[in-house]
Amino acid sequence: MIKILLVEDDLNLSNSVFDFLEDFASVTQVFEGEEGLYEAESGIYDLILLDLMLPEKDGFTVLKELRQKGISTPVLIMTAKESIDDKGHGFELGADDYLTKPFYLEELKMRIQALLKRSGKLTENQLSYGNVSVNLSTNTVQIDGKVVEFLGKEFDLLIYFLQNQNVILPKNQIFDRIWGFDSDTTVSVVEVYMSKIRKKLKGTTFESNLSTLRSVGYILKHEG
């Protein structure tokens, strides 16, 4: 499922956005700029919804520090600041979209979908890589046209790699994304599941292009 970080100090608005997006994405709510920066640095989110007037650290500063750290996660600014100067400053700092308050939740979702499609995080119902084909509607995987069972976290892990090709994925980041910060297991479970999906994908282009970077993590190279 799509993961969105919502950094908004207005509790009512934050809850409204959370409830509206509940069936579409997994939304993490934070209410202060410093906490938002900390969460965003984890790298596990597909999109960040960022208010500008935040306690502790304002949204412009959060955005600036994120981009300085090389974090390219799409950012959609949500704010009552509507001047062209504020909008221009936001885009100069690396914002991907800018939505002024008040806004319709339906418009927010449309803008989110557009950004996710642009970044390759929101795709059609089918993903493919060589002779591996994934149907996102039925959560089924086919290899050379034959259905191969990928259960639970195995399926989630496969999708995560397909949507992050040519990106180095550290083990801790994979763990936080797939199992969650509050999981009662440990990061070593990543290696267990990587072994499982490698066995199921043996002989495929996916398996041959999936590399282990010692003491770092993994990378799935672009097909071809």
Image (tube, grey):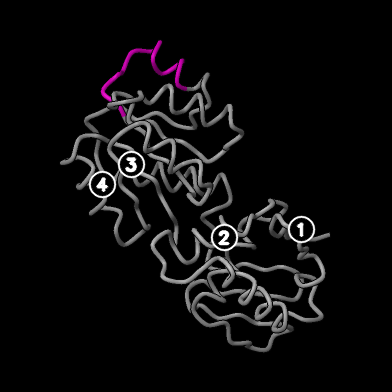
The answer to the question of whether label 4 and label 3 lie on touching residues, with beta carbons closer than 8 A, is yes
Instruction: Tell me which segment is drawn in magenta.
Output: 79-90
The spot of residue 123 in percent (x, y) is: 54, 58
Q: Is residue 144 left or right of residue 58?
A: right
The amino acid type of the residue labelled 4 equals: Val
103 and 79: which is toward the camera: 79
Mark 1 surroundings within 10 Å by alpha-carbon count, few (fewer than 14), some (14 through 19), many (20 or more):
few
Q: Is residue 39 above or below residue 50?
A: below
Q: Residue at x 18, y 40 (%)?
A: 11
Q: Earlier in the sequence, mark 1 or mark 2?
A: 2
Q: Which residue is mark 3?
A: 108
The amino acid type of the residue labelled 1 equals: Leu
Q: Earlier in the sequence, mark 2 or mark 4?
A: 4
Q: Which of the numbered marks, if any, corresponds to residue 213?
A: 1
Q: Is residue 81 magenta?
A: yes
Q: Which of the numbered marks, if any, corresponds to residue 174?
A: 2
